Image (cartoon, rainbow, N blue to C red):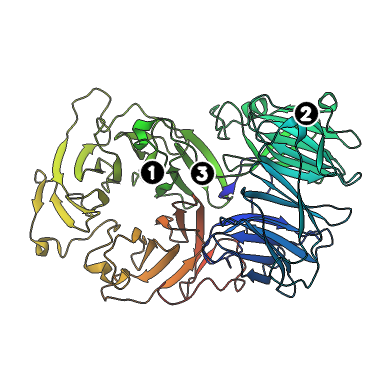
Amino acid sequence: RNGGGGGGGAPARQRHYLEHAGAEILCMALHPGRTLVASGDAGARASVHVWDTRTLATEAVLAGGQRDGIGAIAFTPDGSLLACADLSPQHTIALWNWRAATLLSLTRGGAGAVLGLVFSPKDSSMVSFGQRHVRFWSRPLVGSGGGGGGWSARKGAFGAAGAQTVLCAAFVPSTAALLTGTSRGMLLEWTGHTVSRAVRLHSQWPIFAIAISAEGVAVGGRGGRLLVWPAGSTPMDPQLAKPVDLAQLATGLTDEYGRLRCLLTGDAPCVRALAFARGTLLLVTRAGELWQLGGAAPQCRLLLQGHCALRAPSAHEHGGGARSELWALAAHPQRAELFVTAGDDCTVRVWDAAACAMQCMRRVRAAPQCAAFSPDGTLLAVGGADGTTLLLEPDSLTELPIRPSAPHAGEVTALAFTPDSALLAVGYADGSVEVHSAFAERGAREPLRLLGAHVGAARSLDWSEDGSLLQSCCEGMVLAWWDVEGGGERIIDAEQVSDVEWATWTAPVGWPVVGILPQLSDGTDVHGVSRSNGRHLVATADDFGKLNLFAYPSAVAGSACRVGAAHAGHVSNVCWSCDDSRLFSTGGADMTVLQWRVGRTNNRLDPIDMPVGVSRAFDNERG
């Protein structure tokens, strides 16, 4: 999802299919031929894209008759037809001849939400499952039209097991028996339309995933317990299963400082998806990590890591609820390959852009809202939702015995170091701005200068080249200047700072960036602004899932820009690498971290490792 793991081997390489135009991807299915993928997206006009994993070329776009997003999708065993279920109140299930883009049948899936679809390898009959139901569908009559003709469904009988929400299902190829995993931790085997055997595998936790192949059967879910049956054995006998303790394996995934490289959502990883691949078992956890298990030990590798949506640790930190977004982003000022992100999963992560891998991770008590490196590269400041500011060592994320400020009533929303790294400006959600010594030891009387307050939360801070002036901007789009060297007095006359050289520029307003705002915009739909270190370009992150690249200064309203789109939902932040070779961006709701290549001659934006010319997502017009 967001970057490679620390499992060693060759650097990770990623490619990006971007034709969903910024819509969130809710489900995917692999074609039996193993080269095509179908992906369903969210939105009022739900659509399914079938595309080639080798070339990233779109083979088909299927839309019509369904709405509110595609929640489940499956190919028939021969790969000629595609079924998909939407998220509308009617839970509509459609059958497509996907190569001809022809809708063959459309019918309601029942009262309960449809969480998945699976086809029988024996007769191509279909099973839908979800909220307290399993339904067995006869093969619809091809050419029956879009009115649902030809569908014939029969509701499954749970018998003594009792009606349960079914979270996953798979057919055993050799016997065509159906296995389902439930929210009560039970594995059910179906004969015909009735449960023939039921085994409780987990006393408390749901079963989220079943994988069946010639290599065996794997079942996993919450609680960190994974059961693997060898090929030829029956998965309904727990005594024949090989248990894998993921919590124990996680303890071996540590960095050189002894910290876990994986993120646990509880005492153990929660398994959400499973697949056999070339003698190994792949699993995806609730923390958005891709694990690879293989070998006799079994050996464990982290192939992919990223921020994830987790419940906040306490109501105090998030006002009673989890926002589950990613906002903090900062690039190392001296090492072009390093950058840091931090979000509502209460983790701070250092990434190696060249290797597409996470270098280290640290869990913190309060969800970070912003981050900043000192220009000399020796300090990393992280501002939290609880009003505290942490200073960390950038390479190891070790907390330093320095406390630049006491906890504040509001969350920290902006941070900036002076060019000489001596002072740290801190902006808060209540609009106040403070300046602290960056090296004040705990308990020491530190120089604290209260500069005043904005009418809204401070959203950006920028220092002058000599470190004597500070520029701040709030959510009300009010730009203010402060004479820090002169005691923190506010500068009222803008002409006094008209010729000031600013070390950075992150404000969405001001004469050098007049042209970055879309027409009729009040500035609130621009979440991040970053001027390049070479001072000839400025990038913005907006509310429409786009990254915009302008010339700097951009002093004419409605200036032309290059546009890049890859995030689902709003882009929360953007910044440049120290050598301007890359742009880094973070998605707010999708919590995705992307790095972009900027063309040397035409300033074209491309996600790193994406073949040029594959996607039409980049253009020369304002989004």
Quarter placement of the C terminus: bottom left
Label 3, residues with CA under 10 Å away: few <14, some 14-19, many ≥20? many
Which amino acid type corresponds to the residue marked 1 in the rendered image? Gly
**Disc 2 from disc 3: Cα separation:** 35 Å
Q: In which quarter of the image is residue 289?
A: top right
Which residue is pictured at 29% across the width and 68% down the height? Answer: 521
Which residue is pictured at 48% across the width and 67% down the height? Answer: 564
Q: Which mark is residue 408?
A: none
For marks 1 and 2, give the one nearer the viewer. 2
Residue 431 pos. (x, y %): 20, 46
**Disc 1 from disc 2: Cα separation:** 56 Å
Q: In which quarter of the image is residue 39?
A: bottom right
Q: Is residue 437 above or below residue 80?
A: above
Q: Earlier in the sequence, mark 1 or mark 2?
A: 2
Q: Earlier in the sequence, mark 3 or mark 1?
A: 3
Q: Which mark is residue 377?
A: 1
Label 2, residues with CA under 10 Å away: few <14, some 14-19, many ≥20? some
For marks 3 and 1, give the one nearer the viewer. 3
Q: Can residue 125 be seen in this view?
A: yes
Decide which of 136, 62 is in the foreground and name it. 136
Which amino acid type corresponds to the residue marked 2 in the rendered image? Val
Left-right relation of 286 to 366? right
Residue 65 pos. (x, y %): 61, 68
Pointer 3: what residue? 307
Which residue is pictured at 51% across the width and 57% down the height? Answer: 595
**Disc 3 from disc 1: Cα separation:** 24 Å
Decide which of 208, 526 is in the foreground and name it. 208
Q: In this view, does 195 lie above or below 17?
A: above
Q: In which quarter of the image is residue 522?
A: bottom left
Residue 210 pos. (x, y %): 74, 40
The number of callouts visible is 3
Pointer 2: what residue? 199
